[in-house]
């Protein structure tokens, strides 16, 4: 758990330290929508009753709106396209299944040049039940032609009273 606090502290310190620096404006195109493909890593996954890290494929659709001062507001959605099992954090030894969960969260962040650091909250839903979600992450984008961007993203999701997961993804975004 201390690693999570270190990551959170680092990203918040990064945002605060760069708050007064100049940045590039989106040139009248504050909206961005992206499609990303990646993997979610579940450290406390379970296979055949044994606790082990599980890596599952995922897709994401992210929308961000950039304000002129570098602040961004976003709506980030992700689906893990495989079912998996994890060990319960409340009841040690109890294995719980999740069937293709969909996570959706509202984020607020700070954009400095090509790096977007964000934090947010939302809900993860699956047929077995819903979990509250807390997310922290960062995106790095490379500009391409026609207002397109190549986006690489990392995030950490804390599902309340459930499990943690880490995400690594890449994809294409369009500014409009």
Image (cartoon, rainbow, N blue to C red):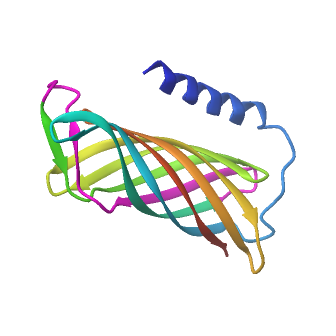
Which picture quadrant has residue 133?
Answer: top left
**Which residue sits at x=64%, y=28%?**
10
User: Along the horizontal axis of the image, is 147 left or right of 32?
Assistant: right
Please provide percent x and percent y for residue 25.
81, 60
Q: What segment is highlighted magenta in the picture?
A: 66-93
Task: Confirm whether the magenta stretch covers residue 69.
Answer: yes
Front position in the image: 126 or 52: 52
User: Along the horizontal axis of the image, is 103 left or right of 46?
Assistant: right
Task: Confirm whether the magenta stretch covers residue 136.
Answer: no
Q: Is residue 132 above or below residue 17?
A: below
Q: Is residue 57 above or below residue 88?
A: below
Q: Is residue 64 above or below residue 45?
A: below
User: Along the horizontal axis of the image, is 145 left or right of 32?
Assistant: right
Q: Is residue 147 above or below residue 14?
A: below
In which quadrant is the C terminus drawn? bottom right
Please provide percent x and percent y for residue 12.
63, 31
Front position in the image: 112 or 53: 53
Residue reaching furthest bottom?
146
């Amino acid at each position: 758990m201390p690693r999570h606090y270190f990551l959170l502290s680092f990203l918040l310190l990064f945002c605060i330290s760069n708050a007064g620096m100049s940045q590039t404006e989106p040139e009248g195109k504050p909206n961005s929508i992206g499609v990303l493909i990646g993997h979610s890593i579940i450290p406390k996954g379970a296979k055949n009753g044994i606790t082990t890290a599980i890596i599952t494929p995922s897709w994401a659709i992210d929308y961000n709106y950039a304000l002129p001062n570098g602040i961004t507001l976003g709506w980030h959605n992700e689906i893990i396209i495989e079912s998996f099992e994890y060990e319960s954090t409340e009841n040690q030894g109890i294995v719980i299944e999740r069937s293709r969960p969909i996570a959706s969260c509202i984020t607020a962040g700070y954009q400095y040049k090509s790096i977007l650091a964000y934090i947010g909250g939302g809900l993860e839903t699956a047929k077995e039940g819903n979990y509250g979600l807390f997310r922290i992450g960062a995106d790095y984008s490379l500009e391409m032609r026609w207002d397109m961007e190549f986006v690489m993203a990392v995030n950490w999701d804390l599902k309340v009273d459930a499990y943690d997961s880490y995400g690594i993804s890449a994809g294409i975004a369009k500014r409009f």
